[in-house]
Image: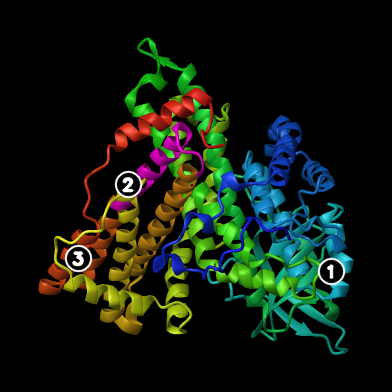
Amino acid sequence: MAAVTASSPARIKGGSFLIEARRVDEIFTPEDLSDQHKLIAETAEEFVKQEIVPRVKEIEEKKPGLLRELLKKAAEVGLCATDVPEKYGGLALDKVSSIIVAEKMARNGSWAVTLGSQAGIGILPIAFFGTEYQKMKYVPKLASGDWVGAYALSEAGSASDALNSKTKATLSPDGKHYILNGTKMWITNGGIADLYVVFAKVDGEKFTAFIVERNFSGVAPGAEEHKMGIRGSSTTPLNLENVPVPVENVLGEIGKGHQIAFNILNVGRLKLGAGCVGGAKVLIAEAVRWAKDRTAFGHPIADYGLIKEKLGEMTAATFAIESVSYRTTGMIEQLLEGVHHGAPTAVAETLAALQEYAVECSILKVVGTETLHNIADETVQIFGGYGFSSDYEVERGFRDQRVNRIFEGTNEINRLLIVDMLLKRSMKGELPLIPAAQKLADEALSLPPSEAAPEDGPLAEETRLVEGVKKTALLVAASAIQKYVLGLEKEQEIIGAISNLVMETYVMESALLRALKKIEREPGEAAAWYADAARTTIHEGADRAELEARRALARIGEGDTLRAQLALLRRFLKRMPADTIGLKRRLADRALELNRYPFA
């Protein structure tokens, strides 16, 4: 694995952004991409232009055999095996390369889901957790596109509670097979797959993963689902009736299937967030083109302020999630620096790196999918009635993106997970969040109201605001823990508010650090656009954070306690309003000038 930075800074602990300040040289940004990364981006983009865009209609209509054909072509240029060791037919690329591919594939939702499932949940459970026999037998076939893989976790009655599986596995009397019975739902690539990673409970109790070939007796994919979006992808149930699975096809350890499921979800969230960045860029280009070509009252609609506001907001939001995507992936890659894909410890170290930044991956998933949803909605609005017509790509884009907030754990589940993971790390002493919150409260109460941090240097006010939102998140979290203790899990609205504050913190700081890095390297007009995007993100994020904190604190406290908490909140987030109207106009003008997302 190639390092993504020239230097080797100290390893950054996952979640530490809440209590530590980061330097610009500690983060990876899109501006740090190597020539190799850029070549991979060009290859992926060219593949989409040549093979996918001309066949979008055929994909949507589910032309028989087309998806398998396209997967085979994608495999020929390495797009199915970016994360697979060379020993098994892969390219062994770094995680930055993986998210670049995910971003470029987002040109079409159905295709992105198809390839994403093949390259991710179709291959990686075996590549990461398989025995040497399993890897040699199956991974090369999947990496080459000769076989198509699928991942069978969900069931009709389990919803987000994936471990509540009703599919059972029973050892045969001769001890040579496990007999699987049950039905899995919402299986991406289900109708075209040759192999399924199936989760079942051994003896109805031990949650376990199995490698199930389609040609095993009793394996029967159901009919294709009729979906709102991603209609061109294959999504089916998977029926298992007395399916004999050889004992050597148990994936991982009996009863340890949750380790596979949860670790693969971390990869999925990282790549899904990157895909949302790519989808947002595509929609911005469509919106810009339409706004320049469409006239109303004698002018292109791009001339009007309310349209510019939309374009500027879309641009700033995409800048923010792109910053989060590359920052998160860069931290993962830093942990993997010096690890060779072929090394015996490579898989364990890769999984450890993904787990270390599981909070950040969840943040990227939630913020990425919700940002893309908003951008898709505004793009339809800019197109007006034409955006509601299936003759235009934005209608399909709006339908396709909706499922992203459900994929890889719903956004509601991820909000709960973000806080749960942070609190567990704090309780274990791995991340001193609670002591930091207590110290903050003590210091805040002892400081005179007039005391303020000195303001100098670029984006000084925004730097102070980011610190203020960090303090706000800690204040609300500490207040909630103090009041509810173990009962906090029943206050999901409060957990959701804390999670929103944590996410705002990470997004704001990621945008800030990226802009400061650009300013430090290339001061001038180019850096000014970065500053505009960061300022928009931070000031509007601070507004949302203040509302979220007030809502939560009003539930947590009352009387003098609440008044004291609100006084701290005002101190943390004291600010003069920024001219976000002007900032968004400048960003919109830049996008209109370039006919695309301006930071590409």
Tell me which amino acid carries mark 3: Leu
Q: Quadrant of the C terminus?
A: top right
Q: Are marks 2 and 1 in contact (CB under 8 Å)?
A: no
Span of residues in magenta: 521-542
Tell me which amino acid carries mark 2: Glu
Q: Position of residue 104 (x, y in %)?
A: 65, 42
367 left or right of 252?
left
Compared with 470, 180 (above or below) is below
Residue lying at 69% horizontally and 34% vertically, measured from the top left: 56
- Identify the element where label 3 is drawn: helix
Residue 400, can we see it? Answer: no
271 left or right of 424?
right
Q: Position of residue 365 (x, y in %)?
A: 52, 56
For label 1, the residue is 135
Q: Quadrant of the N terminus?
A: bottom right
What residue occupies the far top of the structure in this picture?
A: 298
| Number of marks drawn | 3
Q: Earlier in the sequence, mark 2 or mark 1?
A: 1
Q: Position of residue 486 (x, y in %)?
A: 35, 84
Q: Is residue 539 magenta?
A: yes
Q: Is residue 368 magenta?
A: no
The image's mark for residue 540 is 2
Residue 548, can we see it? Answer: yes
Along the line of sight, the residue nearer the viewer: 492 or 372? 372
Query: How far apart, in angstroms, are the residues tagged by discs 2 and 3?
Result: 20 Å
Tell me which amino acid carries mark 1: Lys
Query: How far apart, in angstroms, are the residues tagged by discs 2 and 1?
Result: 48 Å
The image's mark for residue 568 is 3
